[in-house]
Amino acid sequence: MITLEFFAGLKDYFPAVMSLEEIPNDIGSLRRYLRGQKPLASALLEQCRFAVDDTFIDEDYRPHHGDIVLVIPPSSGG
Amino acid sequence: MMTHLSTEKIDVMTLWEQAHHPEAGGVVLFSGEVRNNHQGKEVSHLYYEAADQMANKMIAALLDEAKQRWGLQVAIAVHRLGKVSVMETAVVVITAAAHREEAYAANQYIIDRIKHHVPLWKCEHFVDGERAWGGHCSCQQK
């Protein structure tokens, strides 16, 4: 199982925290899964970065059991 | 402790008092404040959220990087979270260096990185009741 955390505009489509029993092969697969779940969020998900342990991860990162994966929309601080 | 994030109003003057250094001849303070309008619409207030721990770590690392790169004596950055009213400070960056050139350059670098790379988000709340996440800053319109 992995845990996903969503932020900002993504919370209009997903809960703030969500568990996934089936671990995706990589971040690309996770992105496709999420797009399939919420097609209206596709454009935003395409722009998102992902992070584990407070570090951005690449598209080919393979999530591990217990990972907390942050789904990070484009930054808009300041 | 979230040194670089605050749910309370940012006390800019207290931070300013911490920014002086005997070897610093140039001290630059940038205060990003909430405007009452965006693209012709009247703004009521902004709401900020962050991936707290990650954002705090990234800002700390960014300040260390800027200190090294520009030889700063002081580098401070604090970003507000939660509801921020018009004219209040949403983010403050203070840089102190031997000369103004380094202080200005480092300050600009830090605020640009905070705006575009640190996991922080703004939601604009308009007077007409609408809201919108992720307003773009002016540098993305150039």
Image (spheres, rainbow, N blue to C red):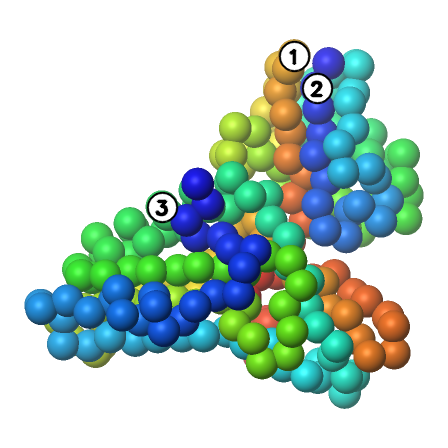
Q: Nearer the viewer, residue B122 or B115?
A: B122
Label 1 secondary element: loop
Q: Is residue B59 left or right of residue B95?
A: right
User: Does the rendering let one see residue A75?
Assistant: no
Label 2 secondary element: strand
Residues packed near mark 2 inside 10 Å, few (<14), some (14 to 19) or many (20 plus): some
Three-letter amino acid code at disc 2? Ile
Residue at image coords 53%, 65%: B9
Marker disc for residue A2? 2
Say which chain tag 2 marks.
Answer: A
State if disc 1 and disc 2 touch (CB < 8 Å): yes
Residue furthest to the bottom = B40
Three-letter amino acid code at disc 3? Ala
A60 is higher (above) or lower (below) than B60: above
Q: Is residue B42 left or right of residue B108?
A: right
State if disc 3 and disc 2 touch (CB < 8 Å): no
Residue at image coords 90%, 43%: A39
Marker disc for residue A65? 1
Query: What distance separates the C-alpha of mark 2 from that of mark 1?
Result: 6 Å
A26 is higher (above) or lower (below) than B36: above
Query: What distance separates the C-alpha of mark 2 from that of mark 3?
Result: 27 Å
